[in-house]
């Protein structure tokens, strides 16, 4: 468990301690184009360490008892996570790395639902797996990923506001971080013709993941 905690601290710290602080622009000035590859390498290495540490932990005492109801929470919410995941790559989103200049114009697709579909996909995946497993190691592993996504979405908003100024404010006012909040507030609308592709692709991806879960994690879901 100690190794998993260290790996989780390194992974979260890599993101929040570098990319979301004043250290990032300093490193960018020093390293130039080498910053992003180096940062990505460190983040990937930390994530892989976290995965290996989690897989090496023997099953321990449960913090709560998984049951059929909690299992169904995961089965119901994971399709939504996959729709958000696929949909995040089907639109040009200024919250994504390298797409900052795509801000402007009417938000489309899943951006009408949330301007952070990727972060919410990870958060839903982490939350459902934490609830479904119920052990301390899963709480650390999945909980760290979920917390990073939640905090990361707010951090991205702050960075984009500083970088993009009025263009970002217009985009932010027409969208929301929390899914459907902008639609409920009347600042945007659901456009179903823009959503059929991410929904279809997300459901197919979920079905494949459901079928292959035994081989991916060693735990069958059906």
Image (spheres, grey):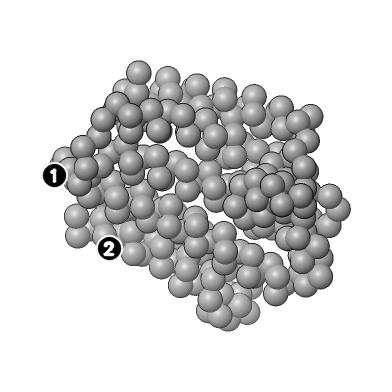
At horizontal 39% and vertical 40% (from top left) the residue drawn is: 128
At horizontal 36% and vertical 64% (from top left) the residue drawn is: 10
Camera sees residue 45? no
In the rendered view, does 6 fall on the left or right side of 197?
left
- Residue 63 position, x and y percent, is 20, 46
Q: Which of 154 and 178 is in front in this view?
A: 178
Query: Which residue in the rendered view is the most extreme toward the right?
Result: 105
- Residue 166 position, x and y percent, is 81, 70
Mark closer to the chain start, 2 or 1 = 2
- Residue 40 position, x and y percent, is 51, 59
Asked if 219 appears above or below 144 in the picture, the reply is: above
Name the residue carrying label 1. 61
- Residue 101 position, x and y percent, is 78, 60
Q: In which quarter of the image is residue 170?
A: bottom right
Camera sees residue 210? yes
Asked if 191 appears above or below 28 in the picture, the reply is: above
Name the residue carrying label 2. 6
Asked if 24 appears above or below 93 in the picture, the reply is: below
- Please tell me how crowded label 2 is: few (under 14), some (14-19), or many (20+) other residues with Cα within 10 Å: some
Q: Find the distance from the CA under tag 2 to the CA under tag 1.
A: 20 Å
Q: What element carries label 2?
A: helix
In the rendered view, does 11 fall on the left or right side of 201?
left
């Amino acid at each position: 468990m100690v190794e998993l905690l260290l790996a989780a601290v390194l992974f979260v710290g890599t993101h929040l301690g570098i990319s979301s602080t004043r250290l990032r622009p300093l490193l960018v000035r020093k390293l130039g184009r080498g910053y992003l590859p180096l940062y990505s390498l460190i983040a990937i290495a930390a994530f892989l360490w976290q995965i290996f540490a989690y897989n090496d932990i023997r099953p321990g005492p449960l913090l709560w008892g998984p049951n059929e109801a909690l299992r169904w929470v995961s089965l119901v919410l994971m399709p939504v996570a996959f729709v958000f995941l696929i949909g995040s790559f089907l639109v040009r989103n200024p919250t994504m790395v390298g797409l900052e200049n795509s801000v402007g114009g009417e938000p489309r697709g899943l951006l009408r639902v949330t301007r952070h579909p990727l972060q919410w996909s990870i958060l839903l995946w982490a939350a459902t797996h934490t609830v479904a497993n119920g052990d301390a190691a899963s709480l650390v592993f999945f909980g760290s990923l979920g917390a990073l996504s939640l905090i990361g979405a707010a951090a991205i908003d702050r960075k984009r506001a500083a970088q993009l100024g009025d263009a970002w404010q217009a985009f932010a006012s027409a969208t929301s971080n929390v899914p459907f909040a902008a639609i409920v507030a009347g600042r945007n609308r659901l456009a179903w013709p823009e959503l059929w592709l991410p929904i279809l692709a997300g459901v197919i991806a979920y079905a494949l993941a459901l079928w292959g879960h035994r081989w991916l994690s060693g735990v069958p879901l059906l």
